[in-house]
Amino acid sequence: MIKATWNRMKYAAAGAGLAAAAVLTATATAQSGAAGAFTELMQRDYLSRDIVYFSQGLELDEGQRMIIESLYEDYRDEFEQGWQDVQDRLNNLNEELQNAGEDQIMDIVLRPLEEWRSEKDRLKEQFEQNVQVILNSEQLDRWPAFQRMIFREKNLHDGRLAGENVNLFHVLNELRLSDRVRSEIDPVVEEYDKALDRALRRRIAVTHDLHNHAFSSLRQRDRSPETDLLRREVDRRVEVRDVNDQYRDKIAEALPSDSAEEFRSRALEIGYPRVHRPLPVTRLFRQALELDDLEDEARAALTEAQASWTEELRSLNTNLIETTRSHEPRSIRNQIDMVAARQRGESVDRITDPTRDLIQQRNERAEHYLSLVRDQLTEEQFNQLPASRSVMRQTAAGSRDRGAGRGEVRDGGRGEGRGRGEGRGR
């Protein structure tokens, strides 16, 4: 649909017999905000599935839910009709364009879209006001918190940085905490709710500025990239990520010890999956220690090695997260600068990724501990472990990667230099 609407604009401009269509295409190609601006115009602010958020977040009764479903149908129908009217206007601009001066072309082509932006906002506000009319006083008191929740649900997922799009409310829900614990952590959770909402709205505001810039650039036939706005967007993404990282630790500190580590680990797995994904050697330790026929000497050696690996892995991952936090924003800014340089006929070098060396270092330590596990097991015992199959697959992949000169070996890969039968051999 985006392509179809874009084509309508080009055909309308081309109908004037001027270069406007070519300018429209070239300018939009240079502007990364243009695609987002047009996508936003075509999408309803509320979707039918959002009725569930209204029902649960505001604790609607059955009668209220039925009314809101009806209100939503009206909102949806008005939106669809309004967007269809925009497309019809674009299809019928030829006559107006034929009588326009060249400096008026872009104004004529963009006017239906800009008017629709205002109408789209009005429809959203009207729907929200209609919903509030049917709420009781207690539900109206919950409206600000509900607005933060639904804004978060609809926008937080659109992250580019590790840790940016993790939703700590979802992580807390996975823990199935008691009402008593929930009540105890409510103050810090409310702090997180408001801090995240502020940071997220600042990020979205820059996104809207990018969209405004895209329309302005089209009108002015300005092909220069929106470098400053894009760099500001990166800063706002860092703010969202930092709120998540800060309150991951704050909420963990407020939780009972038996829940705190689970919460922190799960939040890190979701927020930093490249760092905190489960490693095969970690599973190998656990499965090896569960073997019924494991000798006492081997069990003691594996227990000691497992503790050493756990501590070493914690240190490696902490370093990797800090490096990721530093590198990712720099990498995105570097990409922005590279695009801007190309527009000027210049060049900017791509910065290197320091996390690759750290991952390689972690892989090598994983290989070392894998060898320790195999040294304490017979070949038969090792092959019984479910994790051994994934280890051997990644061993082969890691060997091929190193042989081909590729930088990153998959976590847990063994590499070459040890055969399957070179365990304890008892």
Image (cartoon, grey):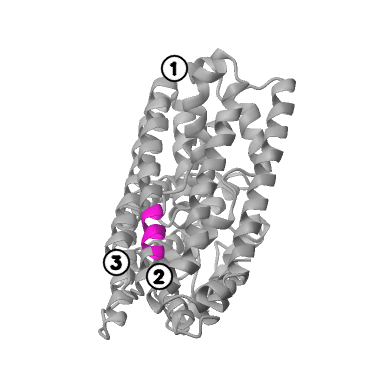
Amino acid under disc 1: Glu
Q: Nearer the viewer, mark 2 or mark 1?
A: 2
Instruction: Locate residue 401, reporting x and y percent.
Output: 48, 78
**Residue drawn 46% across the image and 83% down it:** 22
Q: Give me the C-alpha separation between circle 1 and circle 3.
A: 45 Å
Range of magenta residues: 207-215
User: Pointer 3: residues within 10 angstroms few (<14), some, or many (20+)?
Assistant: some
Residue beneath disc 2: 218
Count of all numbered marks drawn on residues in the image: 3
Question: Between residues 410 and 67, which one lies in front from this camera angle?
Answer: 67
* Picture residue at 36% right of the left edge, 55% below the top: 209
133 on left or right of 200: right
Determine which residue is flagged by label 1: 184
Relative to residue 81, is residue 417 drawn left or right?
left
Q: Residue at x 44, y 26 (%)?
A: 257
Q: Which mark is on residue 227? A: 3
